[in-house]
Every structure is written in structure tokens, then in C-alpha cells.
Image (tube, rainbow, N blue to C red):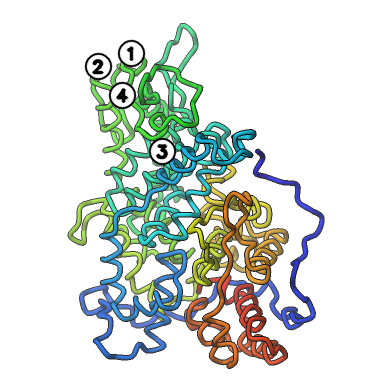
Amino acid sequence: MPIQHDRPTSQTLSGVNSRKFLPLTLLCIGGMLIAGISASGIGDGDDDDIDPGIGSGETVSEYELNEASRFASQSTFGLRYEAIEEIAKKGRNFWLEEQFEIPPTLHKPIAEDLITRQDSGEWDEFVRNPLKLRTVIHRFAWWQQTMTAEDVVRQRVAYALSQFFVVSDRVPVLRLTPYSLTSFYDLLLENAFGNFRDLLEGVALSPAMGHYLSHANNRKANPRRNRFPDENFAREIMQLFSIGLYELNIDGTLKLDTDGEPIPTYDNDDIREMAKIFTGLTYAGQGHYWGRRYFNYADTEVFSLPMIMYERHHEPSEKVLLDGTVVPAEQPGMKDVEAAIDVLFNHPNVGPFFCKQLIQRLVTSNPSPEYIERVARAFNGETGSRRGDMKAVLRAIFFDPEAELGTWSATFGRLEEPVVRMVSLARIFNYTSDSGEYFNTGFRMGFLVEQHPLASPSVFNFYQPDYAPVGEIADNDMVAPEFQITTATTVIGVTNYIGLAIFNENQLFHTFRPHFETPHIDLSEYEELAAEPDDLIKRLDIVLTQGKLSQAIKDIVKDVLNKVDDDKERAQIAIYLILISPDNAVED
């Protein structure tokens, strides 16, 4: 089943009376420029800066609520007001440590349940056309767990990791075998709070990655047949997954040679040597054999177990890796893999290269060199944890002074990508399913906003971390990665999608009816506030814009609400106007 559709020549927002939204002409998309305030009084991150929460019986202040909401917007896919209030009461540090202790909520069990039900003949339609369900099971699992899991920080971090370690359902085998992408995502979930070295090795041995970047069934050289190891994964594990193209200082700035030019981290010889390392790997599971290229969608092992080594297909010769490390000849292939992972993991580039991109995905597009250095030092083990400790990295990212409310520089901020905006809408505004099922094919999302988790057009993700749109951002040597997928079409698409989700009440999710329930929005708590527009706007300012909603937007929203009598319509309109405003689209 295709997941891409021809785009219509025009798009309209169904179910909305456009006369109510005339003030929106004031909200020019050109206003979505990243801005902020000057940084001052930045602390050193010591114990004095730990958020202590509030004592029993104390009232949570508006500042504490906004700070908790800011923290939630960076560390989760969005939380309802009562959950934000809980963070403010407990303190961000204590709440995060609680999150670290919650076991991962995995995706594979959802796939197992759906495949079992399909194979039992529960749905006649899917017996007649089994591919219809099979190709979206991994998406059903993603939405189900993202909407319902208690480990909300882990789920958000795993999504950020999926944009660093990229695989995609645009590859037919991965789309047709549900356990491939669910198991890969579970790998990210299980290691999100673990160690980066384990994560890197897990990705290298992942059968989904092995298929995606073609190092599964990669054979040793045979010069007589002019056959040499595939270099695809060898290149990408260095360029994209660990050290990057150029040598970096610990603050993420480029090291330069005597001519003022960037210094490459590796060359073609390094790629060829690394490619030898990743020969001999193939799919595991019962009845495994070398060269497997056909798969049973219901096989629970082949895409769930790490790849295994077939020694006779592994390159046995000595390998010289990029730091001069010599991998001895004739040792077991998995020893070679472990040696290569160690070399990459211990390279000085990994901290700043990985941490900068994780900061970009979670907090801000343009972290200062000082911010990058502080997080990279946490990665390097300089804060008391082992090198690569993801918990230490996340603490450093979320509790850095630059991430705090009111201490931002003029370069702070990021455009929220469509996936995050829409999932946040569903979570914050209580999309509800009586059956407990939150299954979504993602077809509508892909059509309207041209993005969906695990559906990148290439290994380079939907956007690149150094993308800078022409104009004020590029002129100021800044980047705005998410603008790479921000076009006239997707801006309209996001706006329409938000409108459908709110006014049509159940259009955020697209599923197969009548087999699965379509979740619907529940705005009752906001309808109760709608009698007083100021109260409604204040609550929305907390949950959506962390107290930074401009007076101009507040005035526009209030002016519209004063012309509407019905409380439900008031709530819908207020939420819609704020969600499509620059103040919400750009976190600054």
C-alpha cells in the first residue's frame, strides 16, 4: 500500500467558518523568526541550581508552572496541565529521576498482538488484503505507546535518537515486516537512558539497519571476481552516527589546519578498512543461513535478534582503523566489530558531535559553544558518570542554564517540527479512546505535513542539522534545521491538520474503521474556562507557550472570543489560534 499521495492543487480547512478567523491575517508566517532575550546571570549548574519543588500546602506560582511547562516541552511530547502542575510541585530534578526509573514501554508487543489477531482471522478485510494492516503495524505501535506510555521522557528521547540513527519504512522490506522497525525502535527505547557505546553497537548489529544500509550479507573481498566489501554502513557509522566529517573542539567548533581549513576525520582508506570490519554479518533466528533475502512477516526472531557473524564470509586480514588502531588478523569477526565500536566511541569528536544534535532535537537549534561543551564534558564522564552515560547527558541538556526560562541568548529557539506539534496537540488536549487503542496509519499526517516517524526519505533524516534558510537566519550564521521541511505547502498543511484535529474532533488519527476506534479530542476542561476568555488564554499560555504568548496574540484571541457565545466554540477557536501562531510554532 503506498504511503505517499499526489498533492491536490489547493487545500482548505473543512469544518471551520473562515469568517471567525479574519484577525489571522495579522499572523504572517514571516514572523516565525527565532528570537529571544539576552543571556544574563547564567549559573554553573551546581547543587544550588537544583529545582527543589515546593513544600506541602504551598501554592504553585505562575512562574513555576511556566518553567515546568518549558521543561515538559523539551523533555516530552507534551503534558496536560495537571501533569505540568505535578512537575512544578515535585521539582524538575526529582521528576526526571523518577522517569529514569520507569522501565521502557516497548513497541514489539503491540506488533505481536496485532499479528496474532490478524492471523486468527479477527478481521475479514485483512484476511483478504493482509498487506493493508501489515504495512502500518509499526506505525500503530508508535502511536499507541507515544500516546499512552508512562515513560514519557524515554519516548521523546527515543524519537530524537531515531532522527540520529535513521532507518525508514520507505524501504519495502522494512515496511512489510512489522518486527523490523518495532524492534529497532525498541533498541532506541532500551538504550535511551543507557550508554552510548551500547547504543552504537546495537545499531551496528540491528537487522533493520543491516538491511537499510546494506551491511547484512556483506562478504569479504574476492579480487578475482572484482568483489569488495560494501562501504555504505562503514561510511555512515562514521559520518552520521559517531564522529562526523571534520575534527571538532569539545565545544563543537571546527578544528582548523595551518591553512585555516577544516580537518577531515577520515578518508577513503579509513572507509575501506572500516568496511572490512562489517563483513560476515547476517540475520539471526531459527534456521538462519547466509545470504537470506526473503522474510516471513510473522517471524518474531529474524528482525528482533542482533545480527550474527559467519566467519567464512568475514574479512580475516589485519585492519588499520582511523586512529591507527590495528585490529589483528584472523581474530573472530565479532571481536573486530567490538574493536571498531570502541575506536569510534572513544574518539574525541563523539561527545560534541552527538550532543550538539541531541540539544538541537530537544532544546534549541543554535546551542552556544559553551552549552555544547558542558554537555560534551558530561558525555565524556567529567560529571562523575561513565563516558557515554545517557542519563548524565540528558541531565546536562535539560538543566543547563542556557535551557532555563529567562536566560536565553538572542540565538536561542527552534521551530517545532510537524510530528512534535501534532503529537503534543493530541496529548495536551486529551485525545481519548474508549477502547484504549490509539492506532494511526499516519497517511493523513504524511499527506498534509510530509513527515512521519520512521519514514525519512533518506538516511540523512527529513532535515540536516546544519540547514540554514536563506535570509536573516543564514545571514547571522545560524541554523534552523526544521525549516528544511517548511514550505508553503507544509505550512498550509500543518494549519489545516491542526484545524481538522480540533474542529472535526477526531481527524488527527487516521485508522481502519470499523475495525479500530478513532480517538477523539476532549476539551471539557477548557470549555469550563471559556466563560472567562482571560482565564482560558492564561491556561493555554501555560500549556502551549510557557508564558511567552505575546500581548498582540492575546489581544487577537480575546477579540475573536468576545464575538462567540458558545463555550465549546470558544475553547476550540482559542486553542486553534494559539496553536497556529508563531509564538507556539517557535519555541524561544
Q: Whole-Å distance between the Cαs marked 1 and 2? A: 11 Å
Question: What residue is drawn where x is 50% and y is 31%?
Answer: 297
Q: Please say if 377 is above or below 560.
A: above
Instruction: Identify the amino acid type marked 1.
Output: Arg
Instruction: Identify the amino acid type marked 3.
Output: Ile
Q: Quadrant of residue 346?
A: top left
Determine the secondary structure under disc 1: helix
Q: CB of mark 1 within 8 Å of CB of mark 4?
A: no
Q: Whole-Å distance between the Cαs marked 3 and 2? A: 23 Å
Question: What residue is drawn where x is 62% and y is 49%?
Answer: 512
Q: Please say if 473 is above or below 18.
A: above
Instruction: Identify the amino acid type marked 4.
Output: Lys
Q: Position of residue 357 (x, y in %)?
A: 43, 55
* Drawn side of residue 563 relative to residue 390, left or right: right
Q: CB of mark 2 within 8 Å of CB of mark 4?
A: no
On residue 319, which mark appears? 4
Disc 4 crowd rating (10 Å Cα; few below 14, some 14-19, many 20+) is many
Q: Whole-Å distance between the Cαs marked 1 and 4? A: 17 Å
Disc 1 crowd rating (10 Å Cα; few below 14, some 14-19, many 20+) is few
Instruction: Identify the amino acid type marked 2.
Output: Glu
Q: Whole-Å distance between the Cαs marked 3 and 1? A: 24 Å
On residue 330, which mark appears? 2
* Of marks 1 and 4, the one in the foreground: 1
* Of marks 3 and 4, the one in the foreground: 3
Query: In which quadrant of the rendered image does the N terminus lie?
Result: top right
- Residue 398 visible in the snapshot: yes
Along the polypeptide, which appears first: circle 3 or circle 1? 3
